[in-house]
Amino acid sequence: MKIISTYSARAALVALAAATVCGTIALAAAPGPTLGPLSVNVPSPGGYFQGTGAEILNQHCVTCHSAGFVERQPKLSASTWTVEVTKMKKAFGAPYAEADIPKIVDALVARQKAMK
């Protein structure tokens, strides 16, 4: 086992302390994240539902989905839409009342029937 002299041990501690201080100074001088205002774009009028069921769908669906996204979904039965709309409420926390689920489903089914 090699014995380190007191001088060598002190020199090592001084070097460690200097490296720690320099590292701290370097971290303090490093630029941090830049914070600024957040801009949120809401859908343009073309991003909203028009016509059949538009009011309830714009109120509850376009918070997360564009009208185009919803209208590109395959034609689903009322029972399948009920499962999907309930999932949005329970799994993803959609902010509509349970009582609105049948109204949303009716609007979705009516829109799909109206689409050719």
Image: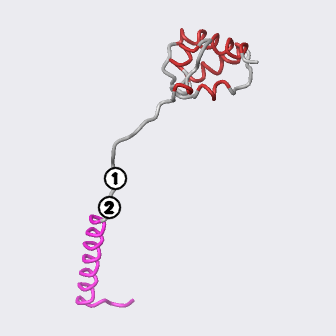
In depth, the one of 56 and 21 nearer the eye is 56
In depth, the one of 105 and 5 nearer the eye is 105
The amino acid sitting under disc 2 is: Pro
The label on residue 24 is: none
Q: How many marks?
A: 2
Q: Where, by quadrant of the figure, is residue 102 drawn?
A: top right
- The spot of residue 17 in percent (x, y) is 25, 76
Q: Is there CB contact under 8 Å for labels 2 and 1?
A: yes
Main SS class of the magenta portion in the image: helix
In the rendered structure, does residue 63 fall within the stretch colored magenta? no
Looking at the figure, which quarter contains the C terminus?
A: top right
The label on residue 34 is: 1
Name the side, left or right, on which 2 lies relative to 20: right
Looking at the figure, which quarter contains the N terminus?
A: bottom left
For image coordinates 72% across by 17% down, the residue present is: 115
Question: Which residue matches tag 2?
Answer: 31
For image coordinates 47% across by 30% down, the residue present is: 42
Say above or below: 84 vs 16: above
For image coordinates 73% across by 15% down, the residue present is: 77
Secondary element type, mark 1: loop
- The spot of residue 98 in percent (x, y) is 53, 12
For image coordinates 25% across by 77% down, the residue present is: 18
- The magenta region covers 1-29
The crowd level at tag 1 (other Cα within 10 Å; few <14, some 14-19, many 20+) is few
The amino acid sitting under disc 1 is: Thr
- The spot of residue 94 in percent (x, y) is 51, 23
Estimate the spatial distance between the alpha carbons at disc 2 and disc 1, rounded to whole Å: 8 Å
Q: Where, by quadrant of the figure, is residue 23 drawn?
A: bottom left
Say above or below: 63 vs 15: above
Say above or below: 99 vs 112: above
